[in-house]
Amino acid sequence: MKVKDIMTKSVISLNDDDTVEKAAQIMQQNNIGAVPVCKNGKVIGIVTDRDIAIRSASQSGGTESKFVRDIMSANPVTGSPDMNLEDASRIMSDKQIRRLPIVENKNVVGMVSLGDLAVNPKSNTQAGDALSSISENNYSAF
């Protein structure tokens, strides 16, 4: 099975000059935890709810005066629509990411999350392994 078979196709994106406040509002309104950041139609970054909490809210000044480009993760790991689900799971595990923007010709065409993989019977084992790997590495100090 391919990523294009399970990816979310209606992806909302941000521009790098959008405010962090706008990013937070979009995430809240659409119940999502990550948004790709584009410039001239090409993916240049990704901003997550964690980026907002850690990189923005913990700093002085409000979210309305900070820009997405200042807190985003630049040059994100991406996948392609034609990659196998196992490959997507492996990438997410290896790179310690929970969401994978799917691009074609550098344009965002979809998004895959560990949750998407977990609910798919053909990939839920790999998704579980990826989540275990991410959790072990992030929370081993506790």
Image (cartoon, helix red, strand yellow):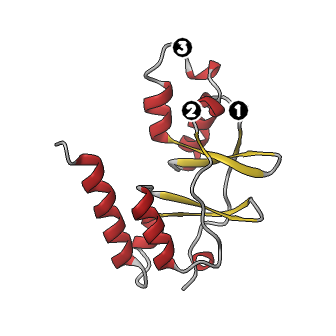
- Residue 123 image point, x, y percent: 42, 79
Crowding at dot 3, Cα within 10 Å, few <14 / some 14-19 / many 20+, comes out as few
Eyeballing the image, is 28 above or below 119?
Answer: above
The answer to whether residue 116 is left or right of residue 13 is left
Q: Position of residue 87 (x, y in %)?
A: 49, 75
Q: Where is mark 3, residue-wise? A: 61
**Is 15 on the left or on the right of 99, as rendered?**
right
Amino acid bearing label 2: Ile
Q: Quadrant of the C terminus?
A: top left
Numbered label attached to residue 71: 2
Q: Is residue 54 above or below residue 114?
A: above
Q: CA distance from mark 1 to mark 3?
A: 16 Å
- Give the percent coordinates (x, y) of residue 2: 58, 81
The crowding category of the residue bearing disc 1, from other C-alpha atoms within 10 Å (few below 14, some 14 to 19, many at least 20), is: some
- Can you tell which quarter of the image residue 141 is in? top left
Which mark is in front, 3 or 2?
Answer: 2
Q: Amino acid at mark 1?
A: Asp
In this picture, is 104 found above or below 76? below
The residue carrying mark 1 is 18
Could you tell which of marks 2 and 1 lies nearer the N-terminus?
1
Left or right? Give the position of 127 relative to 18: left
Relative placement, left or right, of 25 versus 103 is left
Could you tell me which residue is drawn at 28 percent across and 63 percent down?
A: 132
Task: Determine which quarter of the picture holds residue 27.
Answer: top right
Find out whether the residues at labels 1 and 3 contact each other: C-beta distance under 8 Å: no
Disc 3 to disc 2: CB gap under 8 Å = no
Considering the numbered disc 3 on the image, is that residue within a helix, a strand or a loop?
Answer: loop
